Image (cartoon, grey):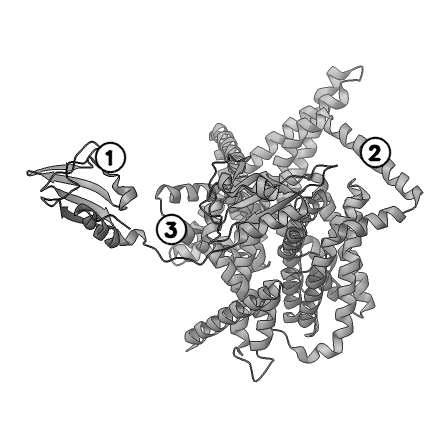
Amino acid sequence: MIGLEFIRDLGIVVLVAALAGWGCKRLGLASVVGYLLAGLIVGPYTPPASLVTDGERIQTLAQLGLVFLMFSVGLQLSLRRLKALGLPLLVATGLGAVAVVTLSRGLALGLGLDATQGLFLAGMLVSSSSAIVSKSLLESGRLHSPSGQFAGAITVLEDVVAVVMLALLTSYVKIGGAGELGLGATLGGMGAFVALLGVGGLLLMPWLLRRMERSGNEELRTLLVAGLLCLLAFGAQSAGYSLALGAFLLGVVVADTPQRAGIERAFGGLRDLFSAVFFVAIGMMIDLHGFGVIWWQVLVVAAFALVGRPIACSLALLVTGQPARLALEGGLSLTPLGEFGFIAAQLGVSAGVLPAEYQPLSVGVALITALAAPWLTTHAEPIATAIVRRQPALLTRLLDEYRGWLERVQSRGAGNVLWQLCRKRVIQIGVGAAFASGLLLFAPPLEQAVREWAGLDTVLPAFSQLVFWSALGLAVLAIGLAIWRNLSALAMLLAEATTKDLPNATALRPVAETGLKVAGGALMFFWLAAVSPFHPERWWVLLVVVAVAAVVLALLWRKLVYWHSEMEVRLQESIAQAPAGGAALLAQTPKGWELEIGEVTLPEHSRAAGRSLRELELPRRHGCTVMGVDRQGVALTNPASETVLYPLDRLLLLGARGHLTAARHEIEETVPPVAGASLTDMVLQTVRVPADSPRGGRTLAEADLRRTTGVQIAGIQRAGVRMPSPAGTERLLAGDELLVLGTPDQQRGFRRWLVGVVPG
């Protein structure tokens, strides 16, 4: 049976992933390396060790792993964090991606690839592996240095670039590479799709999660998110994009909800499981027989990744005004390639765009860069210092002048009152237009799905069609009204700003405002005409929808304005209530001090777990200060000495490099787990106080049973009178029937205590 064979294949994949990951950890390598090697060994191209041979089931495993992997990537990037990163890093990431894509297409020409294949090669090289970059920065002690923070932020933003690139490549394959026009339409359609899911998700997900949270059942919340995850990934694929886009967008939306920490915790095991499944499945798709033909291409592409990517990323940081040394350090830390390269190669090979040999090429390049990344990250500072020391004095002077000019431009832009007044309305217009475009562009397939689901086609097909489009027209009307109000406000502001210094400003202002409104109305008309899905054969539907919209507009003008305001408030609340997460722990190493900032996470069975900071005595014993503790997404800054540490707490330490290493080793030291009683072992039993008990006459407070025996007295029955939850002043008298709460061992110890045996 196919279902049983799939279960068998999944079991094999998970088992070999565990064994290979454990082996790589023992060797100090990334687990991803072990997963890929495990896939190579048990895949269909390495007989006689082949344990999984069905290509369709391997593809299913890879797609399932991809969905959960992209969801976890999206959880790390909320809109709030994106805003906190600032415009310079966004610009640097975009410029770096453009430079990498341009250089990659030039490299493709040198390798004998055509323009379309060059796009897929660029998709393989456009982003670094956030997991490997973070691990290298952490182990080198540079995670919280300025350049380390730049690299960590850029690698997260590169995930966004890679998701967009994958969606474009998927659409490019489906439209058959229909030139610039097709690519432009794909970009516009994808923007509308992202806005539709993003805005709709921010409006609905917080409400749904709050309703689930009131039930107090995390299981239901997890099921809700998992179901939406699979459906949105399928919807994105059906809309002409990739599974990765839908899963990633849901992760970004959930990251902006107060429930993010709980959902991330609930999906932690699924993420680890299916991420490993994805990488093993990628390894199983690789045929090493053609590797001997392209080994030189692997070395060439790896050399480009180790040289070209750092140069492109460093130049992008320089353009945004970062000092040369920090820009070089950040660029050198962004060399390792990761999961997106495998996905782009798999997509290109499965679509017949790239030769089959490029699947092992992507893995070979990723392995080389992953092995080189720790060395480059550790030595980034001396390499950057040596390069800066040898740069010409003229170049140094030009860079200083450029940074000064950029600072002056930024200060003038920050003080531009007109822009500050207009910025919020421009953003609202853009978001509203993108959301309405998504509704209109994807309305036909949505209509078909709704009509089939409701089963109205066989009874009242024309009526159901009319109802759907009227409801859609009402929604677009509300959004269009909001856009028009913002355009009117912009017209008023711009007319005031452009005519205030003219002699006849009073007469010109209404003329300018009217002209700007006419221009805005014309733009709205052409925009709606461009994205409207109505076909000439459906002219009557359009006329009815317009008539209904006109009536609704006349009767519900104030209500539509209220709905728009309510929607805007809900969007702002969704983002404002998002948890800050670990961002609150970011810091920079003070200049002039031989101190560094390090990070360590307590393992599940850490020896330090359950102990307070005072008991650990890290400042006295290791010369380290605990700056903060991140506990399940809640940041404790400057924690008190009485703060007790728990497993999975993330500590931010300040100290010299050697001291940090010693403190990290102690905190990460584990003890063998000890089997103990659980809550399910607790029982209630009745115990009679013996007539000759030496404990008789004592009060419950004096006996201190919780400390001596571990039990709790839940009730006392004396002379037929029951006393539930007795106070500490109640005495134990001979003949009392005690309702005792505790484990079986604690109950036995309590009986022995009653007859005078000292617990030991």
- State how far apart marks 2 and 1 are (Cα): 72 Å
Mark 1 surroundings: few (<14), some (14-19) or many (≥20) residues within 10 A: few
- State how far apart marks 1 and 3 are (Cα): 43 Å
Q: Residue at x 42, y 57 (%)?
A: 673
Left/right of residue 704 with respect to residue 272 in the rendered view = left
The percent coordinates of residue 380 (x first, y second) are 76, 52
Rendering quarter of residue 127: bottom right
Q: Mark 3 or mark 2: which comes first in sequence?
A: 3
Residue topped by disc 1? 701
Residue topped by disc 2? 404
Q: Is residue 397 visible?
A: yes
At mark 1, the secondary structure is helix
Residue topped by disc 3? 220
Relative to 274, is 708 above or below? above
Left/right of residue 58 with respect to residue 128 in the rendered view = left
At mark 2, the secondary structure is helix
- Frontmost of labels 2 and 1 is 1
Pointers 2 and 1 in contact (C-beta within 8 Å): no
Q: Residue at x 68, y 66 (%)?
A: 367
Q: Is residue 80 visible?
A: no
